[in-house]
Amino acid sequence: MNSIYTICYVSKVAPNLSDKDIQDLFKFTATINNKNKISGILLHSLDNFFQVLEGDEKCLKDLYNKIKEDPRHYELYEVYNKKTIHPVFSNYKSTFDIVKTATDLKLVLAYLNQDIANSTNRKLKRLLTPFDLLGDF
Ligand SMILES: Cc1cc2nc3c(=O)[nH]c(=O)nc-3n(C[C@H](O)[C@H](O)[C@H](O)COP(=O)(O)O)c2cc1C
């Protein structure tokens, strides 16, 4: 049986990407991830992408291979790539979450705080706090 898997990374947005390209990517990602039962978040702020993906191991590994090769970003820094006992985002929202505003991010941080004893939640909170300090994006 395939297990639940988590992948998390930060990357830099390709310089030629327009706002429209980013909105199109958001729309595509939310739709296809919901269809494929992948949960998580995708955030864009200050020329960075931050993404957490949770779901079936094989499905995620195949997807990650495509994402890594995608020319719309570069200098991908991997934070997590591991099996998960307690997925963080599968209970967050019924849909894959695109974090578009400072308010969206505050909701994610408040959600992570609910189970801050969990080390994954603590690490994600640490990684996301700098984006929160920047204010609206
Ligand atoms: C920052 C970033 C995040 C992405 N996230 C996803 C994602 O969560 N799910 C997805 O299906 N594609 C995502 N993609 C798009 C994939 O790289 C790829 O273009 C898409 O899966 C279509 O691949 P295909 O045409 O080979 O089917 C992302 C791309 C970028 C640049």
Image (cartoon, rainbow, N blue to C red):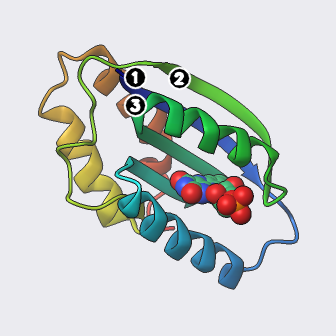
Mark before the other along the chain sequence, 3 or 2: 2
Q: Which residue is mark 1?
A: 123
Residue type pointed to by label 3: Leu
Q: Secondary structure at mark 2?
A: strand
- Residue 90: percent from left, percent from top: 24, 42
Crowdedness of circle 1 by 10 Å Cα count: few (<14), some, many (20+)?
A: few
Secondary-structure class at tag 3: helix
Dividing the image into four quarters, tell me where ligand 1 lies.
bottom right
Q: Residue at x 23, y 22 (%)?
A: 86
- The residue closer to the viewer here, 108 or 9, is 9
Mark number, residue 80: 2
**Mark-to-mark CA distance, 1 and 2:** 10 Å
Dot label at residue 40? none
Looking at the image, do the residues carrying marks 1 and 2 touch, with CB atoms under 8 Å apart? yes
Residue at 50 percent across and 56 percent down: it is 43
Q: Nearer the viewer, mark 3 or mark 2?
A: 2
